[in-house]
């Protein structure tokens, strides 16, 4: 016997079930965005507390560099300096923007150097330079923490799911940046060579026993013969943490000598899937940052019709500001061989400029200093390995133990 169709339509249980389903769907459509927002806020708060913890430990590294007994006033001064900022110049009229950026950068550098001189007058010049670099990393770390807190409070206040989703998408990259900055702050404060120091390390090896002279503020150069050609090697003065005035140095040389080629040696960001320490050749000027030095060299090259060659050592963006990896250190001889090959193949009779681009922290200005730097890099890697801080990409390590000791 079959149930009449009319009875099936009027079954009260089916009506209740349909009503419940409608109620659940409406409830989920209202509650799910809020639940998702709360979940993202929880993750943001976790990242913020991690930044605060790393920021506090970065300040401890800076205080340790100053000395054992740091006064309360000095600690308060450091906390106050963490709020330092530099405002970008107006760019509505792009003419002269490079000089404006250069001027603002100069002012910021002077502020950092003056502050370090005030809190650590007893340190030598190289240690002060390291402290300046460490402070710059700590300031950036502090600013990232403030931005995360800002968006966390903004999302909590407005209940805006779109803001929450944008932050959720950015969080993996933000976390990598935070951890890299924390490690970089410790490394630069202690004078350890970082990934970005590969350019200065390569050219320090090439300088050999030749004497260098200061050609511009915090920048040294030497002239020697390599493969039968006159070569002028330029780098930021070390072993303190400095970037040098590479653009101005090249400009000074180009105005006084006939130049056949300008070569830049630098670290560069690798793509995911590429190996750290991979070497590549190309053309152009491999200098990062705000673009001031790059602009100086490019303008000179265009005016004088000078070829621009570059050799890069690839690494992750976070690896560039962390202690130098073994894969990067192992690329030095191959880079030098490529440079020498390039020199031999360069036509013309003019001099060749080789610029070691990057942070000179831990890297001196000759081959002896370069050998000492390599030994120190290996010891630093052994120390970090004992602490459990080295990332093992095959095992998926994430540097979780960096600050536990």
Image (spheres, grey):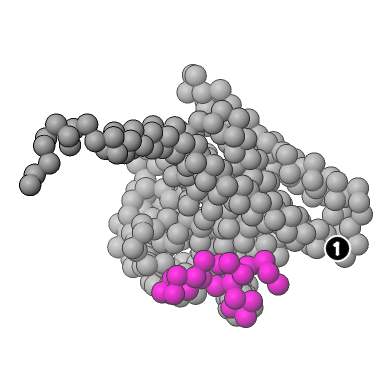
Q: Mainly helix, strand or loop, the magenta region?
A: loop
Circle 1 is placed at which residue position?
67
Vertical side of 381 occupied by 93: above or below? above
* Towards the viewer: 263 or 172: 172
Q: Dot 1, how many residues are within 10 Å of its Cα: few (below 14), some (14-19), or many (20+)? A: few
Vertical side of 230 occupied by 255: above or below? above
Name the quadrant containing residue 26.
Answer: top left
Q: Residue at x 33, y 59 (%)?
A: 281
* Towards the viewer: 289 or 34: 34
* Towards the viewer: 349 or 62: 62
Q: Position of residue 135 (x, y in %)?
A: 71, 51
Q: Residue at x 67, y 62 (%)?
A: 186
Residue 349 visible (yes or no): no
Seen in the image, is 251 located left or right of residue 12? right
Seen in the image, is 224 located left or right of residue 308? right
Vertical side of 273 occupied by 260: above or below? above
Q: Position of residue 48 (x, y in %)?
A: 63, 48
Q: How many marks?
A: 1
**Label 1's element?**
loop
Name the quadrant containing residue 32.
Answer: top left
Seen in the image, is 138 located left or right of residue 115? left
Q: Residue at x 57, y 58 (%)?
A: 180
Q: Position of residue 220 (x, y in %)?
A: 61, 56
Q: Which residues are magenta?
A: 385-405
Q: Position of residue 147 (x, y in %)?
A: 61, 39
């Amino acid at each position: 016997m079959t149930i009449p169709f009319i009875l099936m339509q009027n079954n009260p249980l089916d009506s209740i079930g349909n009503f419940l389903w409608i109620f659940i769907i409406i409830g989920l459509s209202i509650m799910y965005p809020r639940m998702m927002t709360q979940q993202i806020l929880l993750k943001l708060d976790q990242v913020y507390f991690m930044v605060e913890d790393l920021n506090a430990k970065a300040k401890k590294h800076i205080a340790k560099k100053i000395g054992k007994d740091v006064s309360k006033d000095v600690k308060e001064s450091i906390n106050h300096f963490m709020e330092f900022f530099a405002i970008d110049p107006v760019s509505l009229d792009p003419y002269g923007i490079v000089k404006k950026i250069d001027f603002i950068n100069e002012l910021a550098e002077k502020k950092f150097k003056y502050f370090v001189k005030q809190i650590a007058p007893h340190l030598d010049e190289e240690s002060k330079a390291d402290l300046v670099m460490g402070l710059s990393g700590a300031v950036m770390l502090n600013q990232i923490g403030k931005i995360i807190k800002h968006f966390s409070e903004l999302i909590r206040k407005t209940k805006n799911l779109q803001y929450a989703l944008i932050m959720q998408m950015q969080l993996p990259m933000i976390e990598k940046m935070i951890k890299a900055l924390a490690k970089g702050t410790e490394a630069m404060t202690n004078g350890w060579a970082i990934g970005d120091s590969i350019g200065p390390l390569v050219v320090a090896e090439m300088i050999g026993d030749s004497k260098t002279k200061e050609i511009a503020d915090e920048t040294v150069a030497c002239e020697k013969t390599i493969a039968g050609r006159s070569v002028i090697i330029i780098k930021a003065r070390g072993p303190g943490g400095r970037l040098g005035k590479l653009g101005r140095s090249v400009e000074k040389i180009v105005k006084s000598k006939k130049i056949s080629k300008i070569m830049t040696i630098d670290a560069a960001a690798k793509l995911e899937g590429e190996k750290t320490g991979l070497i590549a050749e190309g053309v152009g000027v491999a200098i990062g940052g705000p673009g001031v030095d790059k602009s100086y060299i490019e303008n000179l090259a265009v005016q004088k019709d000078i070829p621009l060659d570059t050799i890069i050592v690839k690494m992750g963006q976070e690896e560039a500001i962390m202690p130098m990896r073994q894969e990067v250190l192992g690329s030095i001889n191959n880079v030098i061989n490529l440079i020498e090959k390039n020199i031999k193949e360069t036509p013309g009779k003019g001099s060749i400029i080789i610029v070691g681009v990057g942070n000179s922290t831990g890297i001196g200005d000759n081959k002896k200093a370069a050998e000492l730097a390599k030994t120190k890099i290996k010891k630093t890697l052994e120390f970090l390995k004992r602490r459990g801080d080295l990332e093992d990409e095959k095992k998926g390590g994430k540097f979780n133990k960096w600050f536990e000791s």
